[in-house]
């Protein structure tokens, strides 16, 4: 039984590496990841059958049929929870209205160290808590904002002006994102995507490959524009 439990833990840990990260869309093809889930599921389900076919009781005084049933139930719960979390993360986090978006952005900024924001006009910044947090970060040199238009509410914050840079391009970048903990090992990028009257925020870590580093390159281009 101990060996079986260790196997289950190891398999769950393997799932966790793929789906329990704070950031979504790990590197690799999604189809291959799903196939990986199926392969792991088959590995998990093989354990109860091995217990069932054992000639000796795995757990003293407990019939192998009962032990196999418990292992099967545990394996099924682990698999279902992992798939559920994987699907939820790949959907991103969806926010129904402006207040929810503002709260989400406030939490990203507040819980971050050095922060970089690429936006058009910071329409979500019209909030007293966000304004105060931006001012605080700016005063500590932990904020950089690249935008096309500076809104009146930010223009009135004196210590924020040195942290804002208007980019001079012949077009408006469609991509708007925030990089939290910029320059640190746990830096992450958060992209807001509108759709059907709602907004979803997708998050990526530096482990997520090209999409993260394309954003970093865009920041460098805007810095020199």
Image: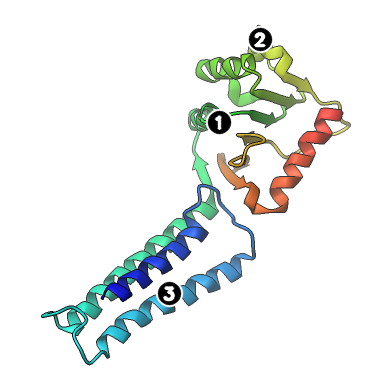
Q: Please give the label number shown on residue 159.
A: 2
**How packed is label 3: few (under 14 Cα within 10 Å), some, or many (20 or more)?**
some
Cα–Cα gap, marks 3 and 2? 55 Å
Residue at the disc numbered 3: 41
Cα–Cα gap, marks 3 and 1? 36 Å
Q: Nearer the viewer, mark 3 or mark 1?
A: 1
Query: Which image quarter is the C terminus in?
Result: top right
Whether residues under marks 1 and 2 lie with C-beta atoms below 8 angstroms apart, the answer is: no
> Which circle's residue, 3 or 1, is located before the other in the chain?
3
Q: Is residue 167 left or right of residue 156?
A: right
Identify which residue is drawn at 32% across, 75% down. Answer: 3
Residue 38, x across and y down, in percent = 48, 75
Identify which residue is drawn at 62% across, 17% down. Answer: 140
Q: How many marks can you see?
A: 3
Residue 121 appearing in the image: no
Identify which residue is drawn at 89% across, 32% down. Answer: 170
Q: Nearer the viewer, residue 153 or 182?
A: 182
Whether residues under marks 3 and 1 lie with C-beta atoms below 8 angstroms apart, the answer is: no
Cα–Cα gap, marks 1 and 2? 19 Å
Residue 22 vs 51, above or below: the answer is above
Residue 65, x across and y down, in percent = 19, 84
Q: Is residue 1 left or right of residue 172?
A: left
> Which circle's residue, 3 or 2, is located before the other in the chain?
3
**How packed is label 2: few (under 14 Cα within 10 Å), some, or many (20 or more)?**
some
> Which circle's residue, 1 or 2, is located before the other in the chain?
1
Identify which residue is drawn at 64% across, 9% down. Answer: 157
Q: Secondary structure at mark 3?
A: helix
Q: Please give the label number shown on residue 112.
A: 1
Q: Colour scheme used in the picture? A: rainbow
């Amino acid at each position: 039984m101990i060996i079986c439990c260790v196997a289950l833990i190891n398999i769950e840990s393997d799932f966790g590496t793929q789906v329990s990260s704070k950031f979504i869309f790990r590197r690799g093809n999604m189809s291959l990841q799903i196939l990986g889930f199926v392969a792991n599921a088959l590995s998990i389900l093989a354990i109860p059958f091995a217990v069932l076919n054992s000639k000796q009781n795995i757990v003293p005084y407990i019939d192998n049929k009962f032990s196999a049933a418990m292992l099967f139930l545990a394996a099924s719960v682990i698999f279902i929870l992992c798939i559920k979390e994987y699907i939820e993360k790949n959907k991103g986090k969806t926010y129904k209205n402006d207040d929810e978006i503002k709260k989400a952005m406030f939490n990203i900024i507040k819980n971050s160290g050095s922060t970089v924001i690429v936006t058009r006009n910071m329409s979500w910044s019209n909030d007293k808590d966000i304004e105060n947090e931006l001012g605080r970060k700016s005063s500590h040199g932990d904020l950089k904002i690249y935008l096309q238009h500076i809104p009146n509410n930010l223009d009135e914050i004196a210590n924020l002006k040195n942290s804002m840079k208007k980019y001079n391009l012949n077009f408006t970048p469609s991509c708007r994102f925030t990089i939290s903990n910029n320059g640190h090992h746990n830096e992450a990028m958060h992209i807001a995507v509108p759709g059907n009257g709602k907004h979803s925020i997708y998050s990526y870590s530096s482990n997520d490959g090209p999409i993260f580093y394309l954003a970093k390159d865009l920041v460098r281009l805007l810095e020199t524009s």
